[in-house]
Amino acid sequence: AKLFYYADEKYHISERTPGKDEINRIIDDLLPKLVEDCLREYLARKKGLTGVMVEEKDFDVDILLLRFKKPELAVEVKWGDVTKLDIPRIIQSLSRVKASKAALFVQDKEKIQADGLAVWDISDFA
């Protein structure tokens, strides 16, 4: 249901009948945001914290969990390819919010090497 509402808000699909190719492009475009939102809500509820997203001029953090406005956990969600070159930038962005813990959430953590950063995938929440 959330995917439909995101797609309708951005692409107005309830007002027309999109083709199969367009639907696939919409899903590819919106799925990372949906994963971010669902993971933010899940972690906030599970840990009893407030989940927010940080968007600044020169960096962003997909998930920041706060305990009484104090950053406790920062998470970057990457739902596409992650290269070794991406890891330092991700670590730098996460460190800017000064949370006590940081993690990277990906589709398959076995494919990622990130020294100094916890790497999670869905198997960590099963």
Image (tube, rainbow, N blue to C red):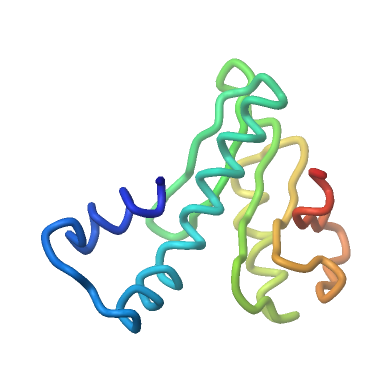
Whole-percent x, y for residue 22 in the image: 30, 79
- Is 44 positioned to the left or the right of 111 in the image? left
Residue found at x 59% / y 15%:
68
The image quadrant of residue 90 is bottom right
Q: Nearer the viewer, residue 54 or 82?
A: 82
Q: Farthest residue in the left direction?
A: 15
Whole-percent x, y for residue 1 in the image: 40, 46
Whole-percent x, y for residue 73 in the image: 70, 37
Q: Nearer the viewer, residue 69 or 65?
A: 65
- Is 104 positioned to the left or the right of 13 in the image? right
> Relative to 118, does residue 79 appear above or below in the rendering?
below
- Is 47 positioned to the left or the right of 57 in the image? right
Instruction: Work out which quarter of the rendered image holds the C terminus and state it.
Output: top right
**So how many labels did they put on this image?**
0
Q: Nearer the viewer, residue 95 or 22?
A: 22
Residue found at x 63% / y 55%:
76
> Relative to 30, does residue 5 appear above or below in the rendering?
above
Residue found at x 67% / y 50%:
95
Residue found at x 30% / y 58%:
7
Q: Nearer the viewer, residue 113 or 111?
A: 111
Whole-percent x, y for residue 123 in the image: 83, 53
The image quadrant of residue 72 is top right
